[in-house]
Image (cartoon, helix red, strand yellow):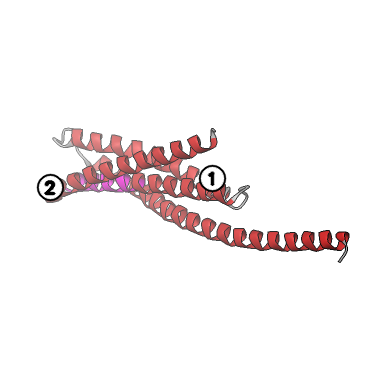
């Protein structure tokens, strides 16, 4: 075999091996996209349920007398719900954006990082939406004089707030680790 045939054979072999790697990378990319899409879909469902809860909650707030001894508690719950709603909607957009970048990432490692960002953003959206839903359960209970449920819902609200804060902390940590990784 002469030198040019040997080089041609090596190039063909290299192209073939590269194609196998691209197929394997493509399969991994498809799996990463599927995982991210699953997380985003769960967050979208939770945000939509929270949107419906907000719509219904407006009616419940109107039912509560202004001189209700629980009005201050309702206002506090609504403030927390509003903060978490804003966070949930923003995080959902971030999750969608990160998920959309997975298949066009320049390396499997970058694709994995986009998937991770999509997943943690979806978690922030999901936990924020759950705070909204729980908060509006409290408003519903106050509006419909379900006083026996208030203590349980207050505890559930506090648990939801704690969980959302932990998820946000984890998101910030992951985001800073990824940012530091690429700032070098």
Q: Nearer the viewer, residue 36 or 48?
A: 36
Q: Nearer the viewer, residue 36 or 54?
A: 36
The quarter of the picture where residue 1 lies is bottom right
Q: Is residue 21 above or below residue 110?
A: below
* Tag 2 residue: 147
Q: Which residues are magenta?
A: 129-145
Residue 80 part of the magenta segment: no
Q: Nearer the viewer, residue 93 or 68?
A: 93
Please report the residue visible at 34 percent of the width from the left and 37 percent of the height from the top. 82
- Horizontal and vertical percent for residue 161? 27, 41
* Tag 1 residue: 97
Q: CA distance from mark 1 to mark 2?
A: 43 Å
Q: Main secondary structure of the magenta part?
A: helix
Question: Can the viewer see residue 156 in this picture?
Answer: yes
- Horizontal and vertical percent for residue 117? 47, 45
Secondary structure beneath dot 1 equals helix
- Horizontal and vertical percent for residue 11? 78, 59
Please report the residue visible at 56 percent of the width from the left and 59 percent of the height from the top. 28
Q: Nearer the viewer, residue 107 or 61?
A: 107
> In the picture provided, is 110 more to the left or to the right than 63?
right
Q: Is residue 56 above or below residue 182?
A: below
Please report the residue visible at 13 percent of the width from the left and 35 percent of the height from the top. 69
Number of numbered discs visible in the structure rendering: 2
Question: Can the viewer see residue 96 in this picture?
Answer: no
> In the picture provided, is 140 more to the left or to the right than 50?
left
> In the picture provided, is 155 more to the left or to the right than 89?
left
Please report the residue visible at 63 percent of the width from the left and 50 percent of the height from the top. 104
Residue 135 part of the magenta segment: yes
């Amino acid at each position: 075999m002469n030198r040019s045939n040997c080089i041609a054979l090596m190039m063909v072999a290299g192209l073939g091996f590269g194609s196998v790697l691209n197929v394997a990378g493509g399969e991994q990319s498809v799996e990463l996209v599927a995982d991210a899409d699953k997380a985003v879909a769960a967050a979208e469902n939770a945000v939509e349920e929270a949107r419906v809860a907000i719509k219904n909650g407006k009616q419940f707030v109107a039912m509560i007398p202004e001189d209700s001894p629980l009005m201050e508690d309702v206002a506090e719950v609504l403030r927390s719900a509003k903060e978490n709603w804003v966070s949930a909607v923003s995080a959902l957009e971030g999750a969608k954006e990160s998920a959309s970048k997975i298949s066009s990432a320049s390396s499997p490692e970058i694709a994995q990082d986009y998937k991770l960002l999509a997943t943690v953003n979806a978690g922030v959206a999901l936990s924020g939406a759950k705070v909204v839903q729980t908060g509006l359960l409290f408003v519903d209970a106050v509006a419909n004089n379900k006083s026996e449920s208030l203590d349980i819902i207050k505890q559930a609200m506090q648990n939801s707030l704690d969980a959302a804060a932990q998820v946000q902390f984890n998101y910030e940590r992951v985001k800073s680790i990824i940012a530091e990784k690429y700032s070098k």
